[in-house]
Amino acid sequence: MLPLLLYLMVCSGIVLCYMRSVYQEAEVAREFLCRKQLETIAQSFMFTALQQEKETEITNAVYTLNPLQPGNDEVKVSVSVNRVKDLGMRFLRVDVSDSCSNEFSLRQCSLLFPDHLLQHFEHSPIIVTGSVAHEESGEKKITITSTSDGAVFPHFSVEEIAIWASTDFPSALELQRDGLSGWIYLCKKELSLPKGLNVNGDGILAFADDVTISDSTVFTGHIIILADRNVRIGNHVKLEKALLLCRGKLTVGTDSIINGAVMAQQDAVVDDTSTITGDREVLEPFHTIISY
């Protein structure tokens, strides 16, 4: 009798383990399906909003959808829009969540430079809107002090876009290896990029403190640099397609090339061996990739 009981207990344990395994696999499959449904819903709302934007201005909205299957979970969709009008920037975010606390988000940013600034850049690739007391910069430097045709520097702060940026600014190794992937990268502290970097790809670089782009650095893609403070560009630097907006002082070293457009609020000191060449392509509408 005892061996039979032991046999039945072992069989029951095996059955229970099997049932638990099947249940866990079913739960994993259900969670995966719910996640994919949330992702599909977010993508649908994102692309619908982008299509709608071609005809009318999109605004904040919240939607409640039919329950998901399996699980009968209620779904809420939130579409949020934020704008930095002086830069022509529009941030769009779609958040999807269900009653089981599963969430999925997508983000996208566009920049459509205002017409009045486009008109000013037609006359000059470099605009300085402010005037400060200048230090002696040496005989090889050209200090640019005059305001260009009454242009007004756009009002913006890097803090306005902080919540939309990537969580961390890439390391030098990551920049060299991966390049920019079409999104917004924010650095809140003083930064000096190491010498000799070669960075590919398009993106928006936002700096809340002083930034130095060190000697022999090359950015090959379409980049937009937004700086709350001073920007120093070293020697033999090449920015192949750059729109640079600096709220502080801009300094450019020897034999450097900036192809695009530059606007400084305080002052610009450019070595006479360096060139800033206008390129209207950097003023065309810019759209980040759709980011998770």
Image: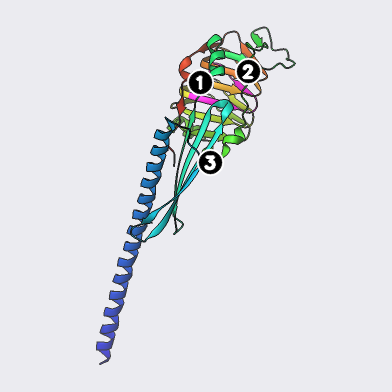
The vertical placement of 148 against 198, above or below, is above
Quadrant in which the N terminus appears: bottom left
Answer whether residue 185 is magenta in the image: no
Residue 140 falls in image quadrant: top right
Residue at the far right: name it.
133
Answer with mark 1 or mark 3, whichever residue precedes in sequence. 3
Answer whether residue 230 is magenta in the image: yes
The vertical placement of 247 against 21, above or below, is above
Residue 201 pos. (x, y %): 43, 27
Task: Say which amino acid is labelled 2.
Answer: Thr
Q: Is residue 39 left or right of residue 248?
A: left
Helix, strand or loop at label 2? It is strand
Judge depth for marks 2 and 3 and give the one in front.
3
**Residue where numbered disc 3 is placed:** 167
**Residue where numbered disc 1 is placed:** 242
Q: CA distance from mark 1 to mark 2?
A: 15 Å
Q: Say few, some or many: other residues with alpha carbon within 10 Å of mark 1 (under 14 / 14 to 19 / 20 or more).
A: many
Tag 1 and tag 3, C-beta contact below 8 Å: no
Task: Say which amino acid is labelled 1.
Answer: Ala
Task: Say which amino acid is labelled 3.
Answer: Thr
Answer with mark 1 or mark 2, whichever residue precedes in sequence. 1
**Residue where numbered disc 2 is placed:** 251
Highlighted magenta segment, given as a residue range? 223-238
Tag 2 and tag 3, C-beta contact below 8 Å: no
Quadrant in which the C terminus appears: top left
At 54% from the left and 22% from the top, the residue drawn is 114
